[in-house]
Image: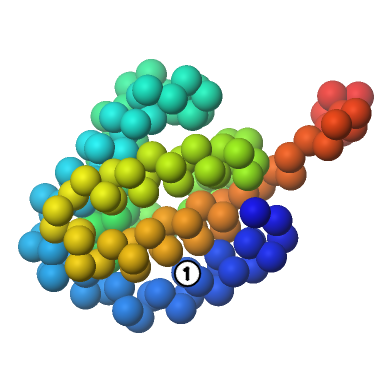
């Protein structure tokens, strides 16, 4: 996805904000989000390239992602209470996220969405959110053949 995808990502996140705040209640609370995070991280653990972006101990990251998703989709604001404002781009700036890394992350997240039965009725909304949010976080262009990055000169 190129620059157009980034624009769609930011607009998509804003457009979805009103329709998805009630998801938490509709799916029955925390449990489906915890199951989603567990399924997602199981995929990450089997993906060597993606796994390299994560610390050795996945426990804190799993907890933070669960808190964030619960808050994002209408549940208690545990993430903000314990970690501050989400600020996704700021929190992910240290990671080199190019379109290929975005696609790897999305592959595992969408697979996780698909295995949590409570999300069946809202699957489309969740899939759009994750695709758009991941696109929004791209902070590196794919390296063109024969071109070095400035920090490699």
Q: Which residue is pictured at 74% across the width and 44% down the height? A: 141
Residue 22: image x %, image y %?
21, 74
Residue 152: image x %, image y %?
84, 24
Instruction: Quadrant for the C terminus, please.
Output: top right
Residue 35: image x %, image y %?
18, 43
Is residue 84 placed above or below 148 in the rendered structure? below
- 91 vs 130, left or right, is right
- Residue extending furthest left? 28
Q: Is residue 119 visible?
A: yes
Is residue 105 placed above or below 84 in the rendered structure? above
Q: Which residue is mark 1?
A: 13
- 110 vs 115, left or right, is right
Q: Which residue is pictured at 31% across the width and 38% down the height? A: 40
Instruction: Quadrant for the N terminus, please.
Output: bottom right
For residue 78, what is the image quadrant?
bottom left
Question: What is the secondary structure assignment of the residue under circle 1?
Answer: helix
Is residue 99 placed above or below 85 in the rendered structure? above
Q: Is residue 76 visible?
A: no
For residue 142, what is the image quadrant?
top right
- 91 vs 126, left or right, is right
- 82 vs 29, left or right, is right
Residue 9: image x %, image y %?
56, 65
Q: Which residue is pictured at 37% across the width and 45% down the height? A: 109
């Amino acid at each position: 996805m190129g620059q157009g995808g980034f624009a769609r990502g930011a607009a998509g996140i804003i457009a979805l904000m009103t329709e998805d705040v009630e998801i938490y209640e509709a799916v029955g609370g925390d449990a489906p989000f915890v199951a989603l995070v567990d399924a997602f991280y199981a995929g990450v653990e089997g993906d060597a390239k993606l796994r390299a972006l994560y610390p050795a101990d996945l426990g804190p990251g799993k907890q933070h992602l669960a808190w964030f998703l619960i808050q994002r989709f209408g549940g208690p604001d545990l993430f903000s209470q314990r970690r501050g404002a989400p600020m996704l781009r700021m929190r992910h700036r240290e990671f080199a996220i190019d379109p290929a890394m975005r696609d790897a992350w999305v592959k595992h997240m969408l697979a996780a969405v698909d295995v949590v039965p409570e999300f069946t009725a809202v699957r489309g909304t969740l899939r759009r959110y994750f695709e758009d949010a991941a696109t929004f976080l791209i902070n590196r262009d794919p390296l063109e053949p024969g071109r070095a990055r400035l920090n490699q000169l």
